[in-house]
Image (cartoon, rainbow, N blue to C red):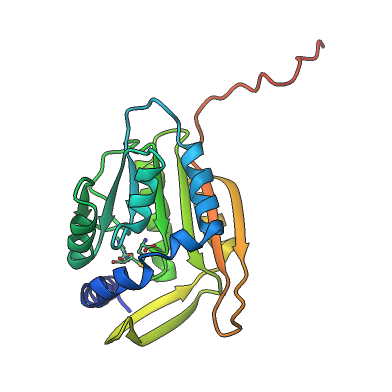
Amino acid sequence: MDGQTWIETTRTAYDLVAADYAETLRDRLAGDPLERAMLGAFAELVPAGTGLPVADLGCGPGRITGHLHALGLPVFGIDLSPQMVAVARRTYPDLRFEEGSLLALDLPGASLAGATAWFSIIHAPTEQLPVICAELHRVLAPGAPLALAFQIGDEDLVHRDHAYGHDLSIYLYRRSPDLVARLLREAGLDLVARMRRETPDPDLPPAMYLIARRPAGHEVNTSYPKTES
Ligand SMILES: C[S@@+](CC[C@H](N)C(=O)[O-])C[C@H]1O[C@@H](n2cnc3c(N)ncnc32)[C@H](O)[C@@H]1O
């Protein structure tokens, strides 16, 4: 699939299912202590007092954006799908949502105090992942954390022709955690934590939750006494 085709296929599919996706996942986070734990850890890692916002990239209907806002973060959402953005704006009228793509974010360098990409890198062909990682590194300020979520696999490509009550066509990848971790490192981000979530259903893949961070710069470790030579 070429670069433009997957973007258009993904946008068309999410435009179609936006309202039903939002309804299906409305209460999911409230019943999910593990996802809340990772998002809570991410929120605590966001450096205080920078005056910079946090972005929820591939925000869909804004359920993660809304949760991070409730945790006290100055967060806004970006999504490829205009219908997802419309649903998010209706659901969270006090928050900012914009159309945009993870591949080329309309944001200045080092302009974010943190970013999440919650199940939104799952549609990008594997060869596009380095582009996304470079964008994430570019927009994060030094010291800013990144939280990613995706289904685990060996970069297996899955095609769906039905989802959220609609006939459609969409492709997604079950991602290799080691590959994603390596690409984040190669883009200049440090790995902070990963959590593998098992699924009770053998037909569904486990999920990976990963926190990385743009290095803060020239950090001097003062926690150990200096040895005299
Ligand atoms: C599975 S949904 C997840 C939505 C939301 N993060 C959540 O957890 O409910 C994937 C979302 O990522 C968006 N998306 C996919 N590829 C994207 C890209 N390249 N740039 C921005 N958004 C993208 C889709 O439009 C869709 O809303």
- The answer to whether one can see residue 189 in this image is no
- Which residue is depicted at the point 38% across and 36% down? 113
- The answer to whether one can see residue 86 in this image is yes
Res 226 quadrant in image: top right
Left or right: residue 133 compared with residue 86: right
Q: Looking at the picture, does residue 17 appear above or below residue 42?
A: below
Q: Looking at the picture, does residue 7 appear above or below residue 74?
A: below
- Which residue is depicted at the point 56% across and 24% down? 219
Looking at the rendered image, the quarter that the N terminus falls into is bottom left
Q: Looking at the picture, does residue 5 appear above or below residue 39?
A: below
Left or right: residue 37 compared with residue 229: left
Percent across and percent down for residue 163 are 34, 83
Q: Nearer the viewer, residue 192 or 129?
A: 192
- Which residue is depicted at the point 62% across and 70% down? 198
Looking at the rendered image, the quarter that the C terminus falls into is top right
Q: Looking at the picture, does residue 163 appear above or below residue 144?
A: below
Image quarter where ligand 1 lies: bottom left
Percent across and percent down for residue 99 are 20, 57
Residue that extends furthest to the top in the rendered view of this protein? 228
Percent across and percent down for residue 147 are 47, 51
Res 4 quadrant in image: bottom left
Percent across and percent down for residue 32 are 51, 61
Res 109 quadrant in image: top left
Q: Nearer the viewer, residue 169 or 95?
A: 95
Total tally of numbered discs in the picture: 0
